[in-house]
Image: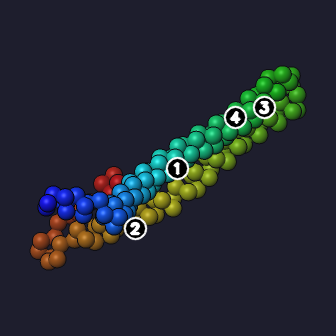
Amino acid sequence: MTTATADATDNSPLSVLGEALEAAAETIGEASSDASESAKAAARKVKAGVSAGAYHAAYGVSFGVVFGAVFLKELLPEESAVRRGLEEGAEAAIDAVASRRAAKAPAVGDELDEELEAQAEKAKPASPRARKTVRVTRDSAV
């Protein structure tokens, strides 16, 4: 009789409802973790696709402009003013980029000099008797 009572308890509407709620909660928990992982994977794929698209668009524009200018220059006679303008304009652009890079270099060097001075200050011995010559070079800071 005890087995019949245990079976009756397991089949009661409240225990069936409890089991159904537990199963639903587990399924929802698994689905939310799966959805989160799927969303992260989709975001990575979209980011990679957008990045590749931006790269190819920039590459195409750059190639089209440069190739078009070089092709046009080669079609023009050597003594043409347009050809000379294209050549000199390209050289001026290259020089401008080089001068901008050179102008930025001292600012980086100044920061390195300050950093080297700070390292030399830290390396100074506390007492005059223990003083050693400390030489700090730019290569050692980097």
Question: x, y (%) of residue 135?
Answer: 26, 60
The foreground one among 141 and 136 is 141
**Foreground disc of the pair 4, 3:** 4
Give the quarter of the image for residue 128.
bottom left
**Percent position (x, y) of residue 142?**
35, 54
Q: Circle 3 sits in a helix, a strand or a loop, which is it?
A: helix
Q: Say which of marks 2 and 3 sits in front.
A: 3
Q: Where does the N terminus fall, quadrant-wise?
A: bottom left
Residue annotated with mark 2: 114
The x, y position of residue 93, in whole percent, is 70, 43
> Dot 2, how many residues are within 10 Å of its Cα: few (below 14), some (14-19), or many (20+)?
few
Distance from disc 4 to disc 2, alpha carbons, whole Å, reads: 43 Å
Q: Name the residue carrying label 4.
A: 60
Which residue is at the far front?
1
N-term mark: 4 or 2: 4
Front position among marks 4 and 2: 4
Secondary structure of the residue carrying numbered label 2: helix
For residue 43, which numbered disc appears in the image?
Answer: 1
Give the residue drawn at x 25%, y 71%.
122
- Under mark 4, the amino acid is Gly
Q: Amino acid at mark 1?
A: Ala
Answer above or below: position of 92 versus 20.
above
User: For mark 3, what is the residue?
Assistant: 69
